[in-house]
Amino acid sequence: MASLTVSSKATATAAAGAAATKQREGAEIITGAEACYAHSKEMLKAVGFPGGVMPLRGLEECGWVKETGFVWMRQKAPYEHYFRGTGTRVRYDAEVTAYVEDGRMKRMTGVRSKQVMLWVPIVEMSLDGEKRDKIYFKSNVGIGRSFPAAAFADDEEEKEGGGDKTGDAAEDERKEEERKEEEGGDKLAGDADAAGK
């Protein structure tokens, strides 16, 4: 009986591997962190999304089958990112997949957003609004939320648009402010000690 289970698992694994290979036939495949990051931003912009909506810098491989719209991004390990512009934490698994078309990413896997105390899978995101200035994120149970697209702008888009800082730029700025506060606090403590002597 156990051999049947192992056999069916092996068959299922082989079938899943064959399906994944078939999905990726004819893909433009990129390897290397910098090249993949640039390629993923290019792909996002090609379908209308801001480059910062998938801030995956540790990518090892990414691919895009333009005929079917299938894309994947594989990184060394899962990654969590906090979007200050929306106040949301998002977890990207080691592999993220989707089917892309103009203004829409559907059948997404590997992306989850923390809502209250639960990690909710995000299965679709689409541009919303008359000016396509909002992004609607849909969960696997059909419930979703919209956020301003500007909250997901990458560093280059912020410089071009002159908008508020979000994402990595805002995080870097916050860390710099904390460092200055700590240094200032140490300096004030030292001044107080010197004044007391």
Image (tube, helix red, strand yellow):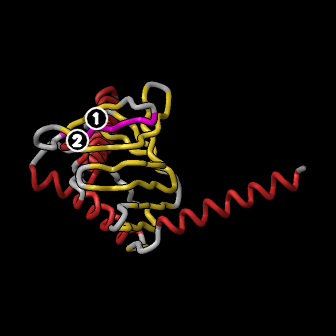
How dense is the environment of label 1, judged by Cα within 10 Å: few (below 14), some, or many (20 and up)?
Answer: some
Instruction: Report the amino acid beneath label 2.
Output: Ala
Q: 22 above or below 119? A: below
Q: Is residue 162 toward the left or the right of residue 23 in the image?
A: left
Q: Position of residue 89 (x, y in %)?
A: 40, 37
The reply to whether the magenta stretch includes residue 138 is yes
Rendered image quadrant of residue 187: top left
Rendered image quadrant of residue 33: bottom left
Q: Is residue 149 toward the left or the right of residue 16 in the image?
A: left
Residue sitting at 25 percent across and 41 percent down?
135
How dense is the environment of label 2, judged by Cα within 10 Å: few (below 14), some, or many (20 and up)?
Answer: many
Kindly report the distance in space between the C-alpha atoms of the residues bearing marks 2 and 1: 6 Å
Q: 188 above or below 9? A: above
Mark seen at residue 64: none
Q: Position of residue 133 (x, y in %)?
A: 15, 42
Q: Identify the residue under disc 1.
A: 86
